[in-house]
Image (tube, rainbow, N blue to C red):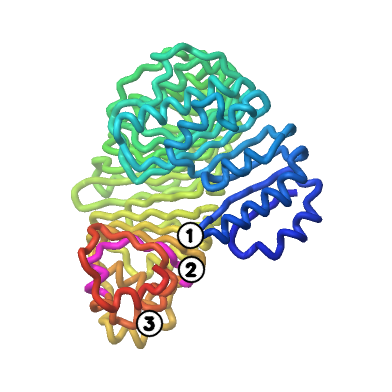
Amino acid sequence: MDVLYSCIGVNKKLDRLARDITFTQSINLVTTLSNEYDNSILDRFCLLILQRIQHNIQCLTFNSLSVERVLRIGNYSKLHKLSLVNLPIEMACHIFNDESSLVYSLRQQISHLTVTINIDNIAEDILEMFKNVFTNIFRMFKNLIDFNYSWYSHIWYSATAFIDLPSRPCYASNVTCLNVTLNNFNDCICLLNADLSQLHTFIVEIDWIRKTSMALYNTEIVSNLKCFSLISFDKTIEYDTKIVPLLRHMSKLEKLTLSLIVDRRNSFIDGNHLVNDILSEMSHLHTFIFNIITNKVIIEEEFLPTRDSILCPLIEKGYNADCYTDYCTINKGQCHIYSLPFTLERMDVFTNKSPDSCLFVNVRHFVAFSAWHPFEHEVFTQISRAFPLLNKLSLHSRVGQEKKLPYQQAKYEQTSSIIEFPHLTILDVCGSSLDYVEQFLFDFYTRLPSLNTLHVDYELLLFATQYFTEDAARANCLKVKHIFFNQEPKTYPENFRNYFPLL
């Protein structure tokens, strides 16, 4: 039985929950404490619920607001799976660097650990703390076999690796599955060079892959991996020099996931390359998930390869895939090739061509960028149909729309083609043309009934809404609770708060 608990509106349910929860083995405790009333509810939950079932609980999930109270309850003798989410870095450092901490008492029994940290500072001492938390966890939890370590931040880090295991004493580790979010490819190589002799699953998301200076010397660990996932959403020019050589060491892989944006390559990454240069080295591979964009390849338009020539080698090997190519006016082409069914949660495109050959029901975040071609209304119609469950859409293009209807005509004649994104909660149009601010906020173009977070250039928002008096954008802005501007204004017009009543 799994229990999801929130400190909002649950007080009347606690007594009944206390009667029904006797045999619960898993608690997901995600709290939102805004006042003393919410604190009292959490206290009651801990007293009425947790004390009764503490000896049965095998899995606990909670955030920084509840960690102290939950762990002080008593003896979690069967607990083996622990998740700590959204921890401030200072709290994480205290929890995993203090032998008197409450987590320390569980160090022998935890086998599965998830830690997500919130970092809002790039000072050297903060980066050192983040590194220390990671290494201290390995020292502390001797029986850890599954470790998920990630961070949330809007900050870009420097190029220096902050997980520097090779320079420290090596630790014997029983970790078999490691899932981490890293700054750069140097960090990835550092981990693969560490003493992780039991590792068979390595899942890594990397901010950017460039200026990589570290060399791989622990090839034994890499060659024994059975599952490897590499995801990066920033462009890289190190695909052939760093990524492909690493993959060629992974001869025992059974599952491989690659999601990459490769820049300035001499040719497209196509089926022929994937089959002959990567898959041919992996005789045990049974699952290959890929989503690869090759961008800015110098090629003349008449020499763009056909869809069949790109996909044929993969299809002959039994892989289901699709692709498309695009071309701009300065002899630069791009190719996007991806496996089907598409199981990743994010898709990026660098063109106004939207993949619409099937439904992408797993995609939650769609990112579109184009420096050459505009995104017309029909493109967003295709996106809404092909990606029905999007909850975040990011659009970055300074190229204005060419087929935009005049305001009055659109307002009264566009009803038949209104686009709707029913699940979209986050919209990011920072750095985009005014046309796209209007495209998404004016309800005679697009309806966003669930929108609660908006990223937008303040000046464009001001102009689009006519100083927050334009009625056409009110409906889509009504539920917005969080708004982020490229530059925070010193003062707001008097109508601003009425336009965004939930801010």
Secondary structure beneath label 3: loop
Mark 1 / mark 2, whichever is N-terminal: 1
Mark 3 / mark 1, whichever is N-terminal: 1
Report how far apart the C-alphas of labels 3 and 1 lie in the structure.
24 Å
- Residue 154 at what x, y percent from top left? 35, 46
Q: Residue at x 70, y 37 (%)?
A: 74
Q: Is residue 230 above or below residue 482?
A: above
- Asked if the residue at tag 2 contacts the one at tag 1, i.e. Cβ–Cβ closer than 8 Å, the answer is yes
- Count of marks overlaid on the render: 3
- Asked if the residue at tag 3 contacts the one at tag 2, i.e. Cβ–Cβ closer than 8 Å, the answer is no
The residue that mark 1 highlights is 391
Per the image, is 131 magenta?
no
Binning the other alpha carbons within 10 Å of mark 2 as few (below 14), some (14 to 19) or many (20 upward) gives: some
Identity of the amino acid at label 2? Ser
- Residue 12 at what x, y percent from top left? 70, 65
In the image, which disc is placed on residue 343?
none
Front in this rendered view, residue 213 or 489: 489
Secondary structure beneath label 1: loop
- Location of the C terminus by quadrant is bottom left
Per the image, is 460 magenta?
yes
- Asked if the residue at tag 1 contacts the one at tag 3, i.e. Cβ–Cβ closer than 8 Å, the answer is no
5 sits left or right of 479 in the view: right
409 sits left or right of 50 in the view: left
In the image, which disc is placed on residue 450?
2
Front in this rendered view, residue 72 or 386: 72
| Residue 257 visible here | yes
- Residue 483 at what x, y percent from top left? 35, 63
Which span is picked out in magenta? 449-464
| Residue 229 visible here | no
In the image, which disc is placed on residue 414?
3
Identity of the amino acid at label 3? Gln
